[in-house]
Image (cartoon, rainbow, N blue to C red):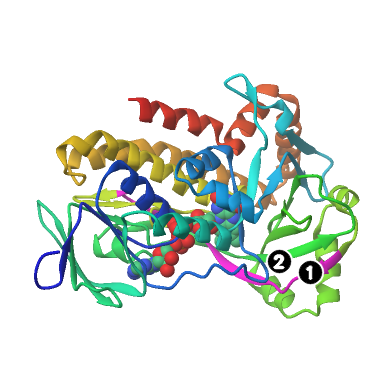
Amino acid sequence: MAGGGTLRVDVVIVGGGAIGVCQALALDRLGYQVALIERGSPCFEPGNPERVVALNEGSRIELDRLGVWSSLEQMGTGWIRHIMVTESGAASMVHLNADEVRHQGRRVDALGYVVDMAHLLQSCYECLSVSSVHLWKESVICGLHVDQEKVDVHLSGAAPVERVQARLLIGADGTHSQIRRLAGIAPFGWDYNRFGLVASIRCEKPHEQTAFECFRSSGPLAYLPLADGRYSIVWAVRPREATQLLNMETAVFQRALMQATDARILERIGAIEQVSPLASYPLELTIARRFTKPRIALVGNAAHTIHPVAGQGMNLGLRDVMRLSAVLDSAIGHRDPGQTIVLQAYSEGRRLDVAAVSAFTEGLVDLFALRLPGAGALRSLGLRGLQRVTFLQDMLIDHAAGLIQGEAQREVFCA
Ligand SMILES: Cc1cc2nc3c(=O)[nH]c(=O)nc-3n(C[C@H](O)[C@H](O)[C@H](O)COP(=O)(O)OP(=O)(O)OC[C@H]3O[C@@H](n4cnc5c(N)ncnc54)[C@H](O)[C@@H]3O)c2cc1C
């Protein structure tokens, strides 16, 4: 450490959510000196309701590579082996099955895994505790200076130093990223005027590792299977409906949820027997116009926050981590991870994936919100077509399982 309370590292990461920590672990493994700054004090106690994410096979492989997956698995992960998609009030539906997926000639265990965010963070921080990463919690940035050679980050809060100097600054500080703002990167997007209501529920029948998604005009309602046999639901509703649902007695909410659930799904899950308290999240689209600036890169929600309809935000963030780590791996000989050419390679490698996933997600949101004449027929054609056209189904399954991206990332790693 230099005098005057300055620490010099190769990379400083701001934001200790799952994406920031995974990025820190990945770069530590490559031999970079890394400092990680988190403004809060992460909580490892599962909430009530649990806040969960569905991760695809590509994300599982990456978490395994970083050493995070094994303890996460011990804490319990729900498996998604089947997915059933319906549109409320329409006849069409789609079934996807893990048995139909082959990856490099072998079967995959699951289409996805449902993990508790608190468990994911706990596993990430356990790995961090045995790494060389300098971690400072309850610390914030109060100044940033960028020149051709380095970034200077001024800190306040609990950090033992006042300043960190690094060759590269990574913003992993979520949707309303301070780093994105300080870097002068404007985002685009919109407020969906919807809230995502989350609850954990117990149903009459076993879930048999099936995730259900029911498209409704106000937004989708998803049931994700948890390790202990319950489901976590994510229900996108308009603000007024959200206020009403949040203020209902449990038994009244239970009835409202059953009414909103497609009859074919209800037949599979049976009566809803127990409901946890509800949590709500405002839903928005926020995409950074650029993912890099000289000596700065954005990852995770700081770069792109999308609608949770297709459960892809965290998966997308983990692919940022993989891509940035891959390009920094090839730059390690030069000891300058902030070179423009490196950051360009990261940005170019991520643009298409982020555009494709956000367009796919927007397409789903828009298609199922359309109330124009003929829109219902279009939707059912879409769902029926998907069920019949095998190669489209395969593509959807591969995307759901993260296998297409997994391949692309491996190519990068081999390059
Ligand atoms: C209802 C809902 C359901 C979802 N379901 C899925 C799903 O099934 N599958 C999926 O892949 N994704 C899902 N997502 C998306 C996923 O949760 C996010 O993409 C992911 O959590 C983003 O992680 P992150 O680390 O980038 O950001 P965050 O989790 O927001 O972490 C940012 C971190 O930065 C810290 N921070 C913020 N500002 C500063 C600062 N100035 N200085 C220092 N630290 C700072 C914060 O304290 C936090 O720890 C869902 C989202 C919602 C809302």
Q: Is residue 385 above or below residue 253?
A: above
Q: In this view, does 362 lie to the left or right of 175?
A: right
Q: In this view, does 247 lie to the left or right of 161?
A: right
Pick the quarter of the image with the N terminus. Answer: bottom left
User: From mark 2 to mark 1, how far is it between C-alphas?
Assistant: 7 Å
Residue marked by disc 1: 275
Label 1 C-beta lies within 8 Å of the nearest ligand 1 atom: no
Q: Nearer the viewer, residue 381 or 165?
A: 165
Secondary structure of the residue carrying tag 1 is strand
How many callouts does the rendering have? 2
Residue drawn 81% across the image and 49% down it: 207
Could you tell me residue 408's position as x and y percent? 44, 29
For residue 365, say whether it is visible: no
Q: In this view, does 43 lie to the left or right of 257?
A: left
Residue 93's disc number: none
For residue 242, say whether it is visible: yes
Q: Please identify the dominant SS of the magenta region.
A: strand
> Do the CB atoms of the residues marked 2 and 1 lie less than 8 Å apart?
yes
Residue 300 in the magenta stretch? The answer is no
Q: Which of 118 and 383 is in front in this view?
A: 118
Q: Which of marks 2 and 1 is nearer the N terminus?
A: 2
Secondary structure of the residue carrying tag 2 is strand
Q: What residue type is labelled 1?
A: Val
Could you tell me residue 82's position as x and y percent? 75, 39
Bounds of the magenta segment: 273-291
Pick the quarter of the image with the C terminus. Answer: top left
Q: In which quarter of the image is residue 15?
A: bottom left
